[in-house]
Image: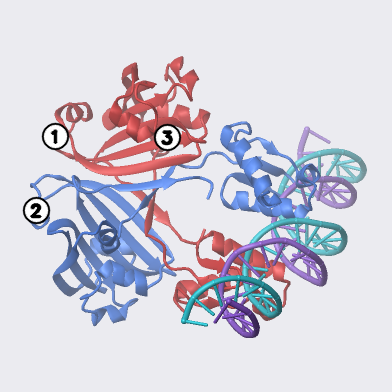
Chain colours: A red, B blue, C cyan, D purple
Amino acid sequence: MKHLHQRIRDDIEARIMSGEWAPGHRIPFEHELMGQYGCSRMTVNKVLSTLAANGLITRRRRAGTVVAEPSNQQAVLQIQDFALDAARAGVEYRFKILSRSIEPIDAAAALRTGLPPGTEMLCLLTLHVMDDVPQALEQRLINLATVPEADKETFKDDPPGTWLLRRVPWTDAEHIVRAVNADGAMAKKLQIQTGAACLMLERRTWQAGAFVTEARITYPGDRHQLAGRFSPVA
Amino acid sequence: MKHLHQRIRDDIEARIMSGEWAPGHRIPFEHELMGQYGCSRMTVNKVLSTLAANGLITRRRRAGTVVAEPSNQQAVLQIQDFALDAARAGVEYRFKILSRSIEPIDAAAALRTGLPPGTEMLCLLTLHVMDDVPQALEQRLINLATVPEADKETFKDDPPGTWLLRRVPWTDAEHIVRAVNADGAMAKKLQIQTGAACLMLERRTWQAGAFVTEARITYPGDRHQLAGRFSPVA
DNA sequence: TTTGCTTTTATGTATAGACATAATTGCAAA
DNA sequence: TTTGCAATTATGTCTATACATAAAAGCAAA
């Protein structure tokens, strides 16, 4: 015997997901559901509030509750952690910092990050290698104003991404995924043909409005893909 | 003056996001928070339950509540709807069904979808065009067992994706994003160079375990990208 | 017809208490 | 030392009630 909360939730979800209650359909008032399930309004209210938070239904005072219109489609993709993936697959992983410098950002980067031009950033170029095969090239900028301790870090044990994730929390992230043809320099480092299609993932993070880091990770298209499973109902 | 619920939530979120309460940190007991904020346990409980549902904290009976470990990184990307986007941008959009047939699926597709080989599917090849420039090529399979009414649909007004989204709800989706070099046939249809990098989005949806549709949408890499913003705290 | 007020109503937030349940802790017996 | 039971405790679920609030609906005056 499940909990009542879950039963009510399952019932309503099933009706929405099956299409029995189409978008725009009026959901019974809290008082009606209260009667139907023989429970208090608080119980019904918590269920409906949860469904509303998940975007399945729309609630408005006095107007009532209706099934939400299907939202803009979205894809949820897992971003792999090389070290973790390699450990699971039982292959050897290593990374190599190809270059490191502190530079003021140019106009384009300033626009992307929202920082004033000239702000000093730690710039790193990292190559990720698994079983001696290059897997990805990572260009990273770290805002030294937000993460001053990055200046002294050698990134000997962990690559910049992992190091940052463990050390600096973030509140907002922006992702862009592109397909690009590898240029000569890139192709050489990744040991692929010039012009080969590559997946380029751009990720920027902020912490309470303060810019933290930008990563541009280029994956050879024949070796990598981004994938994810997704259910609208968490 | 905000509501107490929101104030408690903001307080806790701020402490987690700022790093003051690191992953693993013990969060005060409900009774303590009750005292701190001078409210009932239900109020505190609802806040903590919400944060737990959002994955920010982990709760276990008797053991207490702690800040959750940062989860696997994920990117949430918006999938554009051409018709909608075109309308907003004020450009002309049209689509063209290049081919249509009903075919039994091959072994590879059977593996991807989980259906028995030989299942009959409606196969559509659609070209999306904005201001006379091809924007994407869409190869779609629709499971006629799940969506029999697709057989009679002419897809005159809406492209298959939009038609399906409005008509058939789904409960699970799988996404794969790849970078590929355009082959000759594809390049000709999209009016790009053979070998040009393209973003290929593969999307499969199910409804309560029953396979609904598979779409493989190829976007020229120089014309499109997938983007998304994301906050861990909804 | 339009504007402005009042009433009604469905949801929003909150309380104080009750019992259920899972998991840890501590104690006692083998 | 180990095993097994009982007590403790923090969270999980639920009730019954109260008042707040936004928005629709109805009504009346301009």
Q: Quadrant of residue D29?
A: bottom right
Chain of the residue on which disc 2 is drawn: B
In three-dimensional space, the C-alpha distance between marks 3 and 2, rounded to whole angstroms, equals 43 Å
Q: Is residue A150 left or right of residue B132?
A: right
Q: Nearer the viewer, residue B158 or A177?
A: B158
Chain of the residue on which disc 1 is drawn: A
| Residue A2 visible in the displayed image | no
Q: Quadrant of residue A205?
A: top left
Pointer 1 residue: A193
Q: Is D8 above or below relative to B160?
A: above
Q: Is B131 above or below relative to B102?
A: above
Question: Same chain, marks 1 and 3?
Answer: yes
The residue under the point 31% across, 52% down is B176
Q: Is B172 above or below relative to B12?
A: below
Spot the residue most to the top: A152
Give percent across and percent down for residue B165: 35, 69
Pointer 2 residue: B191
Give percent across and percent down for residue D7: 90, 48
Mark closer to the chain start, 1 or 3: 3
Pointer 3 residue: A87
Amino acid type, mark 2: Gln
Q: Residues within 10 Å of mark 3 (few under 14, many from 20)?
A: few
- Dot 2 falls on a residue whose secondary structure is loop
Chain of the residue on which disc 3 is drawn: A
Amino acid type, mark 3: Ala
Mark carried by residue B68: none
